Image (cartoon, rainbow, N blue to C red):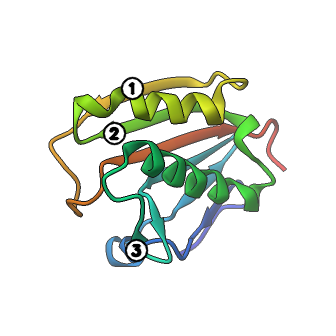
Amino acid sequence: MTESPAVRRVQSDHSHWEEAMGFARAVGAGDRVIVAGTMPLVGGVVRGEGSPYEQTLLAFGNAIAALEPFGLGADSVIRTRMYLSHARDAEDVGRAHKELFGEVRPAGTMVVVNGFVDSRVLVEVEVEAYRGAPE
């Protein structure tokens, strides 16, 4: 794969899906860094089973960690997306989101989906961050 100097792709060790499906955990292009759908995995294992709040904190923690190679953190996040498998979990997911991003106030979207590839997953998240002018 050839990369242009303005595009950088970063892999993680959180999910075997990156390799199996052929995608990057995060892609920096221009002034944006986009983090792919991120589940509550620790060492490739689903954590926080049964707790949408805990899964949201873990998933966003993984997404924020994917920003670190670009020198960014939660304060650089300008957009979040939260995918839930149950509408009943919206309050818990929102509470975790506020805990992490309450001061930052990114644009946020919460959507209920039919399910995830692993039925233990209750929440999957995406983030987009702003890094200013490209390096």
1 or 3: mark nearer the eye: 1
Mark 3 surroundings within 10 Å by alpha-carbon count, few (fewer than 14), some (14 through 19), many (20 or more): few
2 or 3: mark nearer the eye: 3
Instruction: Pick whichever, 106 or 33, lies toward us.
Output: 106
Whole-percent x, y for residue 133 in the image: 82, 38
Quarter-wise, where is residue 13 in the image? bottom right
Residue at (57, 53) in percent of width and height:
63
Q: Amino acid at mark 1?
A: Glu
Identify the element where label 2 is drawn.
strand
> What is the distance, in whole Å, between disc 2 and disc 3 at their CAs?
19 Å
Reply above or below: 93 against 71: above
Q: Amino acid at mark 2?
A: Tyr
- Of the numbered discs 1 and 2, the one sitting upstream in the chain is 2
| Image position of 107 (left or right of 37) | right
Identify the element where label 3 is drawn.
strand
Residue at (30, 30) in percent of width and height:
111
> What is the distance, in whole Å, between disc 1 and disc 2 at their CAs?
13 Å
Residue at (71, 26) in percent of width and height:
104
Whole-percent x, y for residue 89 in the image: 31, 34
Q: Amino acid at mark 3?
A: Val
Q: Residue furthest left?
A: 114
Whole-percent x, y for residue 24 in the image: 50, 65
Instruction: Provide the residue designation for mark 3.
Output: 45
Circle 2/circle 3 CB separation < 8 Å: no
Instruction: Pick whichever, 51 or 132, lies toward us.
Output: 51
Instruction: Provide the residue designation for mark 2.
Output: 83
- Of the numbered discs 1 and 3, the one sitting upstream in the chain is 3
Residue at (33, 77) in percent of width and height:
20
Instruction: Provide the residue designation for mark 1.
Output: 91
